[in-house]
Image (cartoon, rainbow, N blue to C red):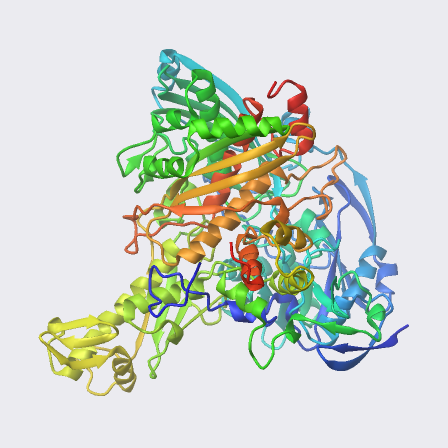
Amino acid sequence: MKSAVTMTVNGAPRTVEVEPRMLLVHLLREHLDLTGTHVGCDTSNCGACTVWLDGDAVKSCTVLAVQADGHEVTTIEGISENGDLHPMQQSFHENHALQCGYCTPGMVMAAIKLLEQNPAPTDAEIRHGLEGNLCRCTGYENIVAAVRAASGVTV
Amino acid sequence: MATTVEQRGIGEAVLRKEDKKFLTGRGRYVDDLKLPRMVHMGIVRSQYPHADITAIDTAAAAAMPGVMAVLTGDDLEFAAGVPCASNPTGDMVHPVRPPLAKGRVRHVGEPVAVVVAADRYAARDAVDAVQVSYSPLPAVMDVEAALADDAPRIHEELDSNVALVLAHKTDGIDAAFDRAEVVVEHTIRNQRLIHVPIETRGVVADWNPSNDELVVHSSTQVPHFLRTFLAIVCGVSEAKVRAIAPDVGGGFGSKLNAYAEEFIAAAVSRKIGAPVKWIEERSEAMVATCHGRAQDAHVQLAATRDGKVLGMRVHYVQDYGSYLQMLTPLISQLTFLMSPGAYAIPEIDVKVTNVYTNTVPTDALRGAGRPEATHAIERMMDILAAELGMSRTEVRRRNFPTEFPFTTAIGLQYDSGDYAKTLDKLLELSDDKATFERRRGEAAARGKLLGRGLSTWVEVCGFVPSDVARSALGLTPGGWESSTVRMHPTGKVTVITGTSPHGQGHATSWSQIIESALGVPFDDVEVIHGDTAFAPYGLGTYGSRSLAVGGTAVHLAAGQIRDKAQLVAAQMLEASADDLDFADGAFTVKGSPDRRVTIQEVAFRAWQAFDMPEGVTPGLDETVFFDPPNCVFPFGAHGCEVEVDRETGKVEITGYIAVDDCGNVINPMIVDGQVHGGVAHGIAQALYEGAVYDAGGQLLTGTLVDYLIPAAADLPHIETHRTVTPSPTNPLGVKGIGEAGTIAATPAVVSAVCDALGVRDLDMPLHPETVWNAIQKGGAA
């Protein structure tokens, strides 16, 4: 049995018929073709699926699509304006904070929210703030550098 | 950090041209693909480590909504089993393994049946509804059990569970031990690890029944090997197979393979006449994708009182798991070859016993055999130092080879090196002994045990001269690499590389090579890879080979472009080719710099083919297959400082310094990034990761809840430094760097923890429980 859910995704209203058990990440990827949001585990450890739900970073593999009914969702595809990279995306580029790119969208989405909550974090606070997002390529060294640079805090 | 620079040739920290698509969610990984009429495949996997399949009841699954087919090993025909391309002795028996089990299973997670359904949810439901009946057999879950006299046999083709024994012994080994003033002995364990690239494996296979063409998209490091093996295993002309590696979300060796699921997906697509997608779930990946390490080393070192190592006896025991995957036998063979590490050990007796168990097959994992060798010899050098009462740095220094090329007792020729230089630099960057001891006292007052350790490492990479691949390694393929460099009429350049990057930044580094070789601006170069339809055969990306072999092929092909362009330019300038200079992307007549033509203008003329010199063919389009004359041997010295909490046993890394030498550097930013990631992986082996089976054959670490890969807070700041000792092996003077950090970090971390506790050695991973128990037993008393 399917039911219709309506949500605002990257600023546009979208209505989709889904099974009640469908995960938000699969609605985004398979029904809306927003494939920038990735899946890397099945236990909510890796954070590759991180999106914003009403402005909060959430793991979209742990949210049912029906729970997002009536809410606002932002994905990696929705954060750059007029073709310009978001400052966090630009900072990831300038600091070589990505290699294979698979964790990158979730990491960027989490990192932007981290700075919203703590605009001038220490390196330790950045590391703890990103604990829900796993990267296997970078050793996090340059991810920490990118978030620090985006915060404007110099060391 | 990197800056935007005008010159973006060799040696510059150029920002990556790959980044923007990944940062904006426009990468295209295999699960992002949708094809018309595409269906989803789910896999029923064995729940037993060793069993006969007595019945498979597919009726309930087949009746579920959305399910199109449920297929077993009897329904899919293959022309060959899952391939292994390594036979070190030439006469090693390769047990045949059908991609989908027939009759017997040999590890938990082995594919037993598949379901095909309209969407992934329906496929997942149907997997659970397939009823498989098993008759369990006794299983062997570790090498000790597998080597017992009455052990159950895993493969009937063999007399025992021993898959292969390799041995090499120099004539003077017994005399070296007779002469020794000190002999130290220890068993060093490299635990079983799981790769965990954040993207799991995945396949989209599309068999077109109208012409028998097969297109397979796979998350692989080796698309050309995959095409060859798809042709062999599925029994189709290789010319009709196209393998594509789209964007690949990390590999670390786990995707250096040709897996059962790739063949199954192709066969299912053929059977049902529609494109088939299979995306591995993480909990599937843990029991279905190769594991790594799982090797013990029983080592004896014979030495003089003043610290000179006279000889090494070592017996490695490698757990192969249940089957041979593509390069399973190669891994411990690389350990075997690198057993003496960075030391001039004149006499050696090395043996490797490779054993089958009822576990997931082991194969390459970042470093692939060299981390195992390095960890064993590095731990032994620490143990020898302790036995002699000598510093850990001094005992190493006294055994470094000093002249290069250096031929080891195994017979490898280390191409170039200056091992003392990296160690000296590490010591310069580290606290002196007095400062460290003062800080150690301060830490003790806080209840912390401060320790520091090091490793001095060398590895063999840049695989591999093809004759060596055959004669010394017993590999089916050689070790060359290809590149095409193509200048378009408008002066832009396309590079088609045989490497298959999945995070290494080849598009950027190869563009830098082109800018340096041809003067064509970095932004005018596009690099394409990973599609067998348009690329010359390439061997892919693994073993820190891409730059030394593939990058060299790019450099050589660019050189051929330049040479040909010079002939055309000479015609255009009405000069002799010998009278031309080439600089900044333009040919000029010697002594008349105003008589000038750019390489872009030459490319246009070569495309027109008007007024070409005698014997010169149209176009600027060159392909080079480069077969290296030797491997390359990067090296370095890593230092690690740890604080151990005396009450909890928790280890915190408080300082990490990497000094590496990978020869000339194309892009220092990318090299640093490779070291960071490599060190993280090595630290993870030392402190966090370990795959654990229970006695019943179940993997206890079967999810990312139970198998701890480190998050940002689990890792330290990693400081990177370099020395530069060019390689004589290739014209760029480069070596590999992708695995360096992993090889170096594990022993450096364990060295530091052992120093903090004052113990000889500890078995990894150094979880708080392990460390706490060592403290209770008197460590750091």
Horizontally, residue B75 falls left or right of residue B431, namely right
B278 lies above or below B90: below
Identify which residue, B107 or B388, lies in the foreground.
B388
Residue positioned 75% across, 72% down in the render: A73
Taking the view exactly as shown, the residue that stands out farthest to the right is A1
B508 lies above or below A44: below
Residue positioned 44% across, 58% down in the render: B1
Image quadrant holding the C terminus of chain B, namely top right
Please give the count of numbered marks on the rendered protein.
Answer: 0
Identify which residue, B431 or B537, lies in the foreground.
B431
Horizontally, residue B278 falls left or right of residue B548, namely right
Identify which residue, B706 or B752, lies in the foreground.
B752
The image position of residue B764, as x and y in percent, is 60, 33
The image position of residue B24, as x and y in percent, is 59, 71
The image position of residue B395, as x and y in percent, is 39, 24
Taking the view exactly as shown, the residue that stands out farthest to the left is B591
Any part of residue B293 in sight: no
Identify which residue, B772 or B328, lies in the foreground.
B772
Any part of residue B577 in sight: yes
Asked where in the image residue B183 lies, by quadrant, the reply is top left
The image position of residue B479, as x and y in percent, is 40, 52
Horizontally, residue B182 falls left or right of residue A97, namely left
Residue positioned 42% across, 52% down in the render: B545
